[in-house]
Image (tube, helix red, strand yellow):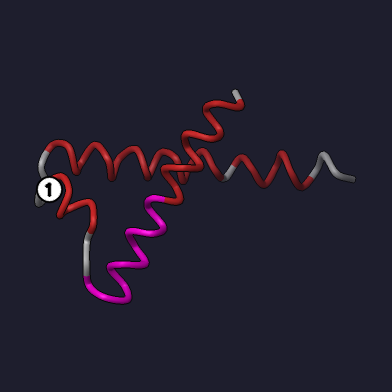
Amino acid sequence: MKILDYVLLTLVIVGAINWGLIGFIQFDLVRVLFGDMSILSRIVYGLVGIGGLYAISYYGRIGFNNR
């Protein structure tokens, strides 16, 4: 489970960096690397989204275990 946590956290960080680039300098790194809504870029966006949904579980694991 720990490996999955690291992989999905890395995807969430990649997504956050990409959104930061889009917001600050209008540069979509995923689009540049994988093409404009190509199958690869859609897979990357999908995996980042799944990683974000999975990261919600971090709140439960860090919030209630430390009490």
In the visual, does 3 lie left or right of 39?
A: right
Residue at image x 37%, y 67%?
20
The boundaries of the magenta stretch are 14-26
x, y percent for residue 1: 59, 23
In the visual, does 18 lie left or right of 61?
A: left
**For mark 1, does the 10 Å Cα neighbourhood hold few (<14), some (14 to 19), or many (20 or more) residues?**
few
Q: Which residue is at the far front?
A: 33
Residue 5, image quadrant: top right
x, y percent for residue 65: 82, 39
**In the rendered structure, does residue 23 fall within the stretch colored magenta?**
yes
Location of mark 1 (residue): 37
Total of numbered circles in the picture?
Answer: 1
Residue 24, image quadrant: bottom left
x, y percent for residue 19: 34, 62
Question: What is the quadrant of the C terminus in the image?
Answer: top right
In the visual, does 5 lie left or right of 21?
A: right
In the visual, does 17 lie left or right of 58?
A: left
Residue at image x 47%, y 37%?
8
Residue 57, image quadrant: top right
x, y percent for residue 27: 22, 67
59 and 6: which one is in front?
6
Residue at image x 67%, y 47%?
59
Mark 1 lies on a secondary structure that is: loop
What secondary structure prevails in the magenta region? helix
Q: Which residue is at the far bottom?
A: 24
**In the rendered structure, does residue 9 fall within the stretch colored magenta?**
no
Q: Which residue is at the far top?
A: 1
13 and 46: which one is in front?
13
Identify residue type, mark 1: Met
Residue at image x 54%, y 43%?
55
- Is 39 situated above or below 16? above
